[in-house]
Structures are given as structure tokens and as C-alpha cells.
Image: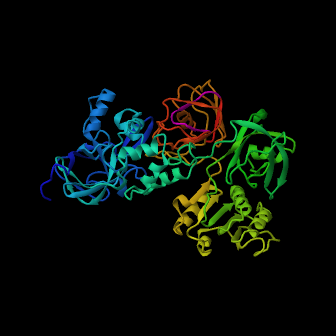
Amino acid sequence: MGPVSTDQRAGTLLSVNVGLPQDVAWRGRTVHTAVWKRPVDGPRLVRRLNIDGDGQGDLAGHGGEQRAVFVYQIGSYHYWQQQLSRDDFSYGQFGENFTVHGLADDQVCIGDRYQIGEALFEVTQPRVTCYRVGIRMNDPRMPALLVSHHRPGFYFRVLREGRVQAGDDIVRVTTGPEAMTVADIDALLYLPGHPRPQVRRALRIPALPDGWRASFQAMLGQPEAAGNAGLTAVSPPPAWPGFRPLAVTAIEPESDSVASVYLADPAGAAVPPALPGQFLTLRLPAGPAGQPVLRSYSLSGAPGEDSYRVSVKREPHGVASQYIHSHLRAGDQVEVAAPRGTFLLQPGTAPVLLISAGVGATPVLAMLHALAASQSSRDIWWLHGARSRAAEPFAAESRSLLAGLARGHRHVCYSRPGPGDVEGRDYQTAGRLTPDLLAELYLPRDADAYLCGPAGFMAEMSAALASLGIAGPRVHTEIFGAAPSSTPGIAAAPARPPHLPSGAGGDGPQVAFSRSGLTVRWSQDYASLLELAEACDVPVRWSCRIGVCHTCETGLLSGTVSYTPDPVDAPAAGDALICCSQPRGDLALDL
């Protein structure tokens, strides 16, 4: 490469920093992280996935081809030294591989290409918000501050491998299309506003990775002011706050273990419409001495009817299901929270796979009702597994709905057919619904799939669909009970059932974790509802822990919260960010 002209030179590489993953003690847990980067002398070879001697501890959030090299600017160093009143920074302080002079976040654009030494790079995305930069900086506010102050830093993709070293010129080769800066893209995802024209511009940038592209596409598909669908699946706003009484109008058997409960407004008014796939949360006096317990049940009836229908399987040791089957009667009243959920039938023309086992048929049956009501011309498959005809809920109902569809298909498996069960009439295959069977059915590969059933069944079916090329955002799942935890970088520990926290306990408001069947009193010893949930081993999901990423966004079934600190972007109506919120009174969470 010849001499570099002044107008080509964009900056200077001040330091090359590397670090391998290590285990770090944090809040009584072990974090596997490579956020500690240290400068190296002399040239280093930059490869497609990282720099020689460097690594990433959590490949789900960092690393990979689109996030091979992280860049941070000395200008931001000087800014944070002043803002935080600190003078203890050294190169690699922000977990970056390249510390650079120039290349400010409000000047560098996604898709820009730069030559440094022998290597060629492309700007792909801003930094991923992560709590580990807070650990490295000894300041848990940092994930939020980096976003709110428009100084996130950015990632390079390596277009040509080569050696680089401190002192190399940084030369801009081409400018990214749409001229959207790193700061622009970061704010568009994480900060309030999300103007649609800007989102459309972002989607026209070829260098933007698929994950960011999917987030912006989700934003375009959501109603205005309905939370941030780019960061998390968002349930439509609840039709009423908290719990309200609904009257039980009928209880009808659906199989040898499943019964449907019909719920209506006591005054005879129509209930607010639910969307196909949503659930209701019931507060039942089923605990010891009539103490209330919370349970969520998928709506199984046709959306838009004047009443709701939930269908409940009797579980041998389930206090709520036993109460419903043995004690609930027509004429009783039940406290009910408004329909919620993100497991929703998506509009479009693509084929639909409704895949379920046992009582998991409930939410996909509501979807089938909606498709039948609209006389959908989509290719629709009903794939269900049950023990026998006696154990199959909604057998006649699902057959009738499918018969009215122009392109309806049905394949039911009985693992233990009864003496009177007829193959070809009642069911199509003796045995379980298996991956091999899915492969034999020649399912449409461009389908949207909706899965509900036991956790093992859904994991098996999701893997089977992925092997057929149906994966990612086209596979939707609904989980009974608590969702699995997501605690990035935390070393695995033996799972424990939810329990009361150790110690004397609090004397504050009651916090009910509805999916976990646990109610505890709040204590000021906890900084957030997330910390209380963790103390109780309630399964939780989080990443930033400071109100940026929305990974912890949770349905707020009743009650209100306050925030300390305030989230960077507010959650959807009826939700709470548990990582930075505290109860303002008794409340119930969908956890």
C-alpha cells in the first residue's frame, strides 16, 4: 500500500488488546468472561473470528464473524474519565480489542470499510449491551450509560486477514450505504422513539447482521407505542389492570383428564377479545385454608366470542387443577387477569404447522379456530400426539374445523391406542409424534410452526423442524410453567425448585411468582425484583441488569412497580423490567 493521503486517514490504532476467557467471582457466582483485555507489543494476526491470543467467553452474545473485533475510541476514554471522575483507565478498559484515535461513534457508519495494516475490516454493529462491562469497570451502570450517552463502540467484521499493530494508520476505503452512524443504529434499537423511516433505512444496510435486522423488522410489525418488539416479544396491552371477577358459566369434559371452563362477565357484557394463542391467569382459593394460588391456562376457544374458554388437565399433585376439577362449579366466580402472551398466530400467507401433545393442544386450537373463521387459504397442518382417543382433547372439534378449510391436513398419533380406536379414522399413526415421522410427512419448508406441549417434546420437535430447514423466527413455542433461565456467562449450577429466600424474610408487599407457584414478601435487602427472584431460585432471564436490553421484561399481572434506575426505554404496557424495578404494593409477576 502506498502513502496515505490526509483525507483518507480516519484515525490511528493506538493499542491492540487481547484476553482469553477466565472465571471471575461476582455476587457469589462465577462468571466466565474475556472482558479483561490487555495491550500486546508488536504485530498480531487478525483472523476471521478474532485476533491471535484473543477469545470470547459467551459466544451467544459476543464473537463470531460479525463481531470478530471490538473497537473503542480514546475520545470516549477522555469523556468517561471526566463523567465518572476517574483516572485509572488503561488500554482495553472497555473490553475492546482495538483502542483507536478517531472513528467516533457519531461519525463511523455501519458498512464503512477500513484498512488497518494488512487487514481489511467492515463495521457491522454497535456493542451488545452486557453486564460484564459493568463488572470490568466496577460500575454496574455502564451498560445503560454507554447507550444513553451515545458512546457504545462497535464491531468489525474481518474481510481480509492480516497483521496489525499499534501505530498503524486507519484508512477509510468505502463509506457504508444509508450513512447511518453507529450511534444512530444503537439509539434506534435501544432508545425511545424508533421512527419508522429510520428503521426502514437501517434494513437497507447490507452489512447489518441478521440479529439486528430481525429486531428492526419486528419493530415494523408492532403497533406504535407498544413497547420495544426489537428487543423482546411484546404482548399486546392487557384489556384490564390486575384481576377482575368472571363468572363460571359451564364446565365441560374434553377427555378423560381435561375439562374446559367457560368464563363470562357476571353482568352479561361481552368480554374483551383475546388473540389466538394467549392465556388467562386465574387466582383460585386452592391453597391451604383457602389461600390463593395463581395459575395460567391457555385460551382454547374461538377468539372474539362473548366468553372465554380455558381447558385444564387434572394433575395428580396439582392443587389448582384438582380444585378446578373437583370443586369449581357453574355459577362460581373466579378472579382473572386479562389475556396475555406473545405466543400469537402471525398474519401472512405462509403455511402453518400446529404441533402439540396432550393438553398442549389448547393454544393451537384457538389458532385453528381463527384460521377457520377467516376461511384461510393457507396450507394448515394439525399434528398432535395423545395416548388414545379417550385421552385426546378436542378430537371432534379439531376434525370439524379442519374439514372446513380448503387446505387442512391432520395427522394424529396415539402412543397407546384403545381397543376401539380405529387407525385411519381416529388416528393416523400408532406411536409417538417423532422427528422421523415429521420428515416423512413432507411438510412445507416455508411454514410458520407453533409448538406447545411438554418441554422435552418441544425441544425434540424444534430440533426436528430445524433439521428440515424450519427454524429461527418461524418457530414459535409456548411453555407450560416457568420458562428456562437465561443468565449469560454464569457457570451452571444444580437447579433447585423455587423456594422462600433464606434468612428472616421481608415485611414488605407480597410478590407472587405465578408460574413458579410462590409468593414471598419484599425486603429492602434486594435492589430489584430480579434479585428477589434469584434469591428464591425462580427461573429468570437477563443480560444487562440495568434497564437497557429488555431481556428481563416480564408480564405484570397485577400491581405496580417503581424504577431505580429508570429504564433507558420503557417496557410495554402491562410489563415490568424486573432488573431495575421494585414493588409499590402487592403484585403478581408472570414468572
Image quarter of residue 376: bottom right
**Left or right: residue 527 compared with residue 286:** left
Q: Between residues 528 and 161, which one lies in front from this camera angle?
A: 161
Q: Which residue corresponds to the image point at 48% horizontal and 37% vertical from the top-left?
A: 547
Question: Is the C terminus in the top left, top right, bottom left or bottom right quadrant?
Answer: top right
Q: Position of residue 355 (x, y in %)?
A: 65, 63
Residue 128 is at least partly visible in this image: no
Instruction: Name the one closer to the observer, 148 or 389.
Output: 148
**Residue 229 vertical placement versus 432 (above, below):** above
Total count of labels: 0
Quadrant in which the N terminus is drawn: bottom left
Q: Position of residue 97 (x, y in %)?
A: 28, 47
Using the rendered image of the protein, determine whether residue 546 is visible from the camera's viewpoint. Answer: yes
Is residue 85 depicted above or below 488 in this figure? above
Residue 315 percent location from the top left of the image: 74, 50
Q: Splitting the image into 4 quarters, where does residue 351 fall?
A: bottom right
Furthest-left residue in this view: 3
Which segment did they paint magenta? Answer: 574-585
Question: 375 or 472, which lies in front?
Answer: 375
Magenta span contains residue 341: no
